[in-house]
Image: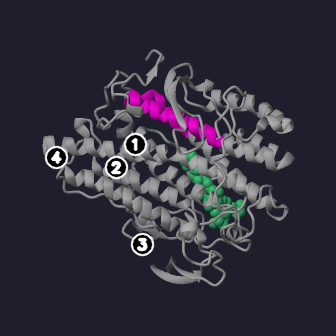
Amino acid sequence: MAIDYSERIPNNVNLDGDRRLQRALEAWQPEFLKWWGEMGPEGFQSCDVYLRTATSVDAKGWATFGYVKMPEYRWGVFLAEHASDERIGFGEHKGDPVWREVPGEHRGVLRRLIVTQGDTEPASVEQQRHLGRTCPSLYDLRNLFQVNVEEGRHLWAMVYLLHAHFGRDGREEADALLRRRSGSADNPRILGAFNERTPDWLAYFMFAHFTDRDGKFQLGSLAESGFDPLARTCRFMLTEEAHHLFVGEAGVGRVIARTCELMKQHDTDRVGELGGIDLAIIQRYLNFHFSVSLDLFGSELSTNAANYFSAGLKGRFRETDLTDDHRLTESVRRILKPQDGAIVEVEQPALAALNETLRDSYVADCERALARWNKIIHDAEVDYSLALPHRGFNRAIGHFSATSVTPAGEVVTREAWLERQAEWLPTRADREFVASLMKPVTEQGRFSGWIASPVRGINHQPIEFDYVTGLPAA
Ligand code: BYC
């Protein structure tokens, strides 16, 4: 399963053996590079960045590290190895052999799922393109670029599926993925969170923590797909995704650690004048990114989600580990719903409520990470706890979108909510203050005053390693 890097498009899918597909992807490649030049990290394209590149897709050492200029990164097409059990694990086709080709009757929905997934990848690169200019350290700059090139590769992963399995429609969708733009009024990205700005590094770490974590769960459910090329593509993407989540969680954790250090040193909880970020501001950023990311799971009740599952296209997270009948036609579950000024639990068909089931898995994962952040605070002997807001708070999708819910889970009037919004979501003053801290630090081994240094470097290199060289003059 080694990857051949002498190919123009590195791959482990035997692209040589399919000249038509190879030519189609080779025609898309310059368009991708043009997009990367226009919308990728601004101002750093000629730097040498200490990046990892996939060399094989098996568990043993798939990555190799070395200096690469980002436009020369070897974006390629990599599928994980075949699973041992090649049967569909859920839905109406449970037990049938997996599909190697797109089943005709599911063509439209499958394409839509792949396009939606694919659209998020370039979107996140676009959202993060200005961040390099204000990096808190070379270490963080390198991590940002690692995430960016891998999101680019995730786009390649979805584009390969579109080209290989969806004919002319697929090629058109692949082109459209390079035309939509995050935040554009005329041609925006598909999902809400991917049109929000990522204006500063606290927002970036929160995004990598909360929004990339949606990626973990969505890719995890697509990795269960009965459409085998999609499942194997997503399985390999998940191995890359783990690093992105690390960047987010550790990044926020280091901001918290620095804040606590300043609080203890100066016996105050207002660390702004000392160049740190108050825990209250961190909480407001958390509230924003968590709620926007909850929307990415779709409505609580969704016939789309039920159809994806019944058709065998999109499972639940770790479907195979679950012990029910994997069909859910007779199952019910309880979901939260706003009703007459309160939040009540109602019973609903489990199939219709699958978005909520995936959202539950996500929230539980966020809770575990939150406990690790709170441990940093408590270990520093600071009397404060961060909390996840209620899942009805600040929602734009689903049945909470028309209801005003506080982070504590109280239903209030719209007026009351708007009056207190500044307590809960980042204010303009918060954003301006955080922006004022965003001064680039690019000396080896140095870090901005608002963030602690990491525990260790990348790939056993020291923290003061020269992770990015050839920086543009300030
Ligand atoms: N914003 O039936 P519903 C990642 C639309 S992140 C805007 O509830 P469904 C990454 C919906 O499309 C993972 N629109 O939706 C992270 C539908 O539209 P139509 C990305 C939204 O289909 C960081 C309508 O509302 N992968 O990888 O059950 C960096 C009715 O909704 C939103 C995927 O999402 C929204 N938030 O569920 C880089 C996996 N939510 O039909 C990468 C593929 C819903 O009325 N996508 N709508 O036009 C899916 O599985 C589903 O499309 C969704 C939505 C879960 C997103």
Q: Looking at the figure, which quarter contains the N terminus?
A: top right
In magenta segment, residue 141: yes
Instruction: Give me the disc on residue 8.
Output: none
Determine contact: label 3, label 2, CB under 8 Å. no
Question: Tag 2's secondary structure?
Answer: helix
Query: Of marks 3 and 4, which one's residue comes earlier in the chain?
Result: 4
Category of crowding for the residue at label 3, using alpha-carbon neighbours closer than 10 angstroms: few (below 14), some (14–19), many (at least 20): some
CA distance for labels 3 and 2: 24 Å
Mark 3 and mark 1 lie on one chain; the one further toward the N terminus is: 1
Residue bounds of the magenta highlight:
127-155
Q: CA distance from mark 2 to mark 1?
A: 8 Å
* Image position, residue 208 (x, y; %): 47, 46
Side of 181 where 288 appears, left or right? left
The dot on residue 268 is 4
Quadrant field for ligand 1:
bottom right
Q: Are marks 2 and 1 in contact (CB under 8 Å)?
A: yes
**CA distance for labels 4 and 1:** 21 Å
Q: In the image, 99: left or right of 397?
A: right
Spatial CA span between label 3 and label 4: 33 Å
Up/down of 89 relative to 186, above or below: below
Label located before the other in sequence (4 or 1): 1
Residue type of the residue flagged with mark 1: Leu
Q: Which residue is mark 2?
A: 282
Q: Which residue is mark 1?
A: 202
- Asked if the stretch drawn in magenta spans residue 275, the answer is no
What kind of residue is marked 3? Val
- Per the image, label 3 sits on a secondary structure element best described as strand
Q: Which disc is residue 412 wearing?
A: 3
